[in-house]
Amino acid sequence: MKQFIKNIVLFGVFASLFYVLFISITEKHNPNNMYKKQAGHMHTRLSEIPKYPKIDILFIGSSHAYRGFDVRIFNRNNISCFNLGSSGQTPIQSLYLLEKYLDDIECEKIVFEVSPQAFSSDGIESISDIISNEKTDWKLVKMGIDSENLKVFNTLIYANLRRFLKLDTNFSEEKTIGKDTYISGGFVERQKQSFKPSVSTSYEIKQPQLAAFEKVVDIIKGVGIELVLVQAPVTLAEYALYKSNEKFDALMSTYSDYYNFNELISLTDSVHFYDSHHLNQSGVEVFNEAFIELITN
Amino acid sequence: MSLILFSTIVDYCVGLGLKNESHSVSKRKLLLWISISVNIGLLGFFKYYNFFIDQFTTAFTLFGTSFEGSSINIILPVGISFYTFQTMSYTIDAYRKKIEPTTNLLAFSAFVSFFPQLVAGPIERASSLLPQFIKKKQFDYTTAVDGMRQILWGLFKKMIIADNCAEIANTIFNSPADHSASTLVLGAVFFAFQIYGDFSGYSDIAIGTARLFGFNLMKNFSFPYFSRDIAEFWRRWHISLSSWFRDYVYIPLGGSKASKTKQIRNVFIVFIVSGFWHGANWTFIIWGALNALFFLPLLLFKKNRTHLDTVAQGKFFPTFRELIAMASTFLLSTMTWIFFRAESIYHAKEYFQYMFDWSLFSAPNTLSKSQLKITALLLMFFLLIEWLGRENEYAIERIDRLNKIQRWSFYAFLLALIGSCMPTSQNPFIYFQF
């Protein structure tokens, strides 16, 4: 029995080292390793935070936020802002980012982009995105463990191995990646292109997401910052597929000022979107002007 | 829980009754029928009640009258199909005086509810498992390591082979109309590997776990996809159930010693009942009947026991004839799996209908190329290991011939593959529903 336990422990060590080596070698072809340095320009966005110590509006939320709120349009209207949205960001990651960066950014208003998808998502895409671009701290590790997802564990192991081996020390992100161009202040621009409507889907609010959302609301209100909740517009076809829109609107309205832009502005699927739920630059113009008018009047 | 307790107490008491030498033959028969009625009754009610109500309602409607039976919401107790068959084998063997009924209630209860094989088998025989609960256990290093190895191989089969194939097979089976005929063929092939990886993987985990505790369970799968005909396939697939039906249904009905007509009847009864055992759905009955149909010519031409050995024994490559035989047996079983996987007869009919059109000769479509590539590579690796280990109890049993570094590297490689390629969506074991 003693020999058996001893060998189990030794094999555990051996297999762990082998595992780390294996996921490192197979990085690009490994379906369970989501390490990606260049997704949604998160690396550049995080490195820009010190440049924006005092602003009027801080945006948080998913790609609807960083692709939907163009900092240039706000600047044009004499509103300074920074966009901390990220790929697939859900309330759990918004909470992590706010807890980490709210002390570094002084702002009057926080616009939190909310949607039924974000509340029903497991947030795996976003956690992996943050892990790939952010220095590891205990809260990040805890968020990874709480996800109970193998892809996140693998990404966490691999990202930290890279950091340990200093493989990313000289990394600099391209401003234009594929069709996306990063605009200083956190916005990512994409020009008009055609898309194929997706077939969707009903969304069910996950309890941990709602709990994280409530914490975010408490934190923001606790420090006396004005909170605005916004549901960014998606295509009419996509919005028609969401069930319980009214229920979601009613729920959000109980927390703070809430605007559902699917109900407030009129956009055309083929003109203002580049896919079923992301605005192209002409859509962003219409959306942002309408939003600025709403908050300044 | 109360059901398994009830079943255990009834069969324990029946066993005690059968142990009593003074009982007349008719009293012994009565005891046996009590056991069979209780077990079949429980199984019938919990598994088949709603099915029969539906069938009666449909039948009465066809004849223009109405039948006032209403379905009820029944939750199928976990493992009921397995432990009822296991306890029945105990009372039948005791009745036949093949085993000495036990007076040890604790050992008997452990025999009925032994945790590794409770929910999905192997369906054990009392003659083999019961004495193991009475015998004193001592830790054995080699047995424990062997158990761990078999668990690892079972995990690989389930988490890598079955679950990856499930991702593709589910997409295709969920909407046959959206896929080309060649894609549907691919879907059936992936399901064939899914069901094998899923169920034989579970069996390996169960057998390995039992070995860790010093118990030997029977082999449940013996590389069935390397069979050269359907008869061999059924000697190698779900062995504990096939042998149960052979010993307690087929042979008592006269087996292959009866007249030709009776032989045909017996084969159909066994396969159809075996199909129905899987679930209360006509798809399982048709699946069983099709297997009987494929088995029958072999029996009638006395070819059903041609392949009792392992294919290409002692050689690396099979002959061309063996290769063709294996491929055609795999194809036949894969066709029958379509009924097993389909949710209804209509679903199966639709699947077959779309599978046989001109797009059969086009390249498979609408699947993620990278997912397909990775799954195909994993399947090739799996088949190679299974082929190399086909003469053993399980594929990687004889890896102990390698040195420690080679062995550990192989185990670590399997674990790394599991961590890297296992789908993150949850896929419960298919046989848990039975």
Image: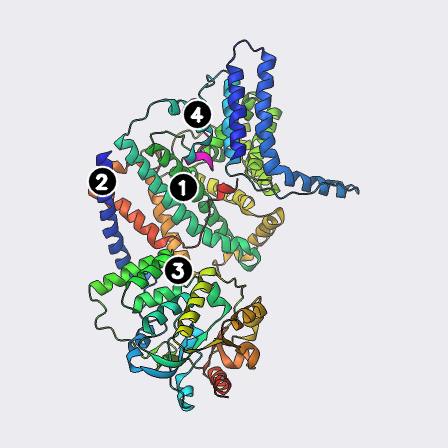
- The magenta-colored residue range is B116-129
A216 or A230, nearer to the observer:
A216
Q: Which mark is residue B201?
A: 1
Q: Mark 4 points at which residue?
A: B106
Mark 3 or mark 1, which has the lower sequence index? 1
Q: How far apart are marks 4 and 3 (CA)?
A: 53 Å
Q: Distance between the residues labelled 4 and 1?
A: 29 Å
Q: Are marks 2 and 4 in contact (CB under 8 Å)?
A: no
Circle 3 chain: B
> Residue B79's x, y, as percent?
50, 37
Q: Name the secondary structure under disc 1.
A: helix
Mark 4 or mark 1, which has the lower sequence index? 4
Q: How far apart are marks 3 and 1 (CA)?
A: 25 Å
Q: Name the residue under label 2.
A: A7
Residue furthest to the top: B22
Q: Do the residues labelled 4 and 1 touch (CB within 8 Å)?
A: no
Q: Distance between the residues labelled 3 and 2?
A: 37 Å
Circle 4 chain: B
Q: Is residue B317 visible?
A: no
B429 or B367, nearer to the observer:
B429
Q: Is residue B121 magenta?
A: yes
Q: Name the secondary structure under disc 4.
A: helix
Q: Which of the two discs, 3 and 1, sits closer to the camera?
A: 1
Q: Residue at x 24, y 64 (%)?
A: A162
The relative height of residue B276 versus residue B305 in the rendered view (above or below) is below
Q: What amino acid does circle 4 point to?
A: Leu
Q: Name the secondary structure under disc 3.
A: helix
Q: Residue at x 28, y 59 (%)?
A: A157
Say if labels 4 and 1 share a chain. Answer: yes
Q: Which mark is residue B370?
A: 3
User: In screen coordinates, is A289 left or right of B373?
Assistant: right
Q: Which of the two discs, 4 and 3, sits closer to the camera?
A: 4
